[in-house]
Amino acid sequence: MRFFLTFILSGLFARQAFSQNDSVKKRKIDSLTIKFKADSARIFKFNRYRPYANIDNRNSFIKNRPVNFQGGQIGFIFKEYHVFGLGYYTMTPNAQRASRRFNDSRTIDRYLLLNYATVFYQYVMLDKRFLEIDVPFEIGLGKFKNKQVDADNGTIILNQSGVIVPTGAGLQFVLKPFRWIGLSATGGYRLVLDKNVNVDFNGLYYSFGLWLDVRQTYREIKFYGYTRKDYRHALHDIMAN
């Protein structure tokens, strides 16, 4: 009789101990889950302002001649849908090479140089998981040099320089197979407000490039590489004890 009583009491104490242990584990798991959710929300939180940078290499045309510009943009993003910043563009060395034309039995080499800075605004019209459509606007101030030389005797026919005020608008499409990297394509039109009788700077421009979201890259590394991994390890330790 004493044996059965001891057995029953032992079973009750063991059950109570297991129950207390399960209750402790549950509290630890609940606390860990709350911390994990808070850390995740902190990583992916909404930022009212964040920096913006873009390497922008544009292809364009001046008097039906293809020219290339290399440049970049820097600024900030406001509320995820409004981008404000400054840009700067200069013609590539290859685009600065002489273009040859024939006029009145003469061979003329024309050298053209154009550099300009812009203030731009870009509106994010659509931002979906795999597609983003932006509408950029810009106005700037630049300087040009236009030199024409007789290729036969080296006589300078024209040598002028001046200031221009370029404006532009276009569309940018971003395809995002991943959240942090994708491909972008931009097309637009450049309109120069002040006219020049010798050089027409109006024309289409387009560019293709790699799109990279540095912020999202940081988020992915922080969440999947550290936060979620630490959570799983801590959860495993709780369950093992």
Image (spheres, rainbow, N blue to C red):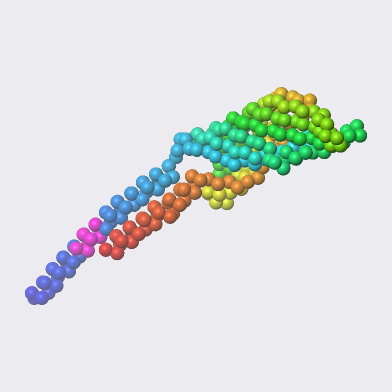
Viewer-nearest residue: 115 or 224: 115
Q: Position of residue 195 (x, y in %)?
A: 74, 24
Is 28 above or below relative to 60?
Answer: below
Q: Main secondary structure of the magenta part?
A: helix
Viewer-nearest residue: 6 or 111: 111
Q: In the rendered image, is residue 220 in sight?
A: yes
Q: In the rendered image, is residue 191 in sight?
A: no
Q: Quadrant of the N terminus?
A: bottom left
| Magenta segment boundaries in residue numbering | 17-24
Decide whether residue 22 is among the magenta residues. yes
Residue at 56% of width from left, 41% of height from top? 127
Residue at 50% of width from left, 34% of height from top? 78
Decide whether residue 60 is among the magenta residues. no
Q: Position of residue 48 (x, y in %)?
A: 46, 35
Is 79 above or below relative to 225?
Answer: above
Query: Outermost residue, top direction?
Result: 194
Question: From the viewer's perspective, is 61 left or right of 213?
Answer: right
Viewer-nearest residue: 39 or 27: 39
Is 102 above or below relative to 38?
Answer: above
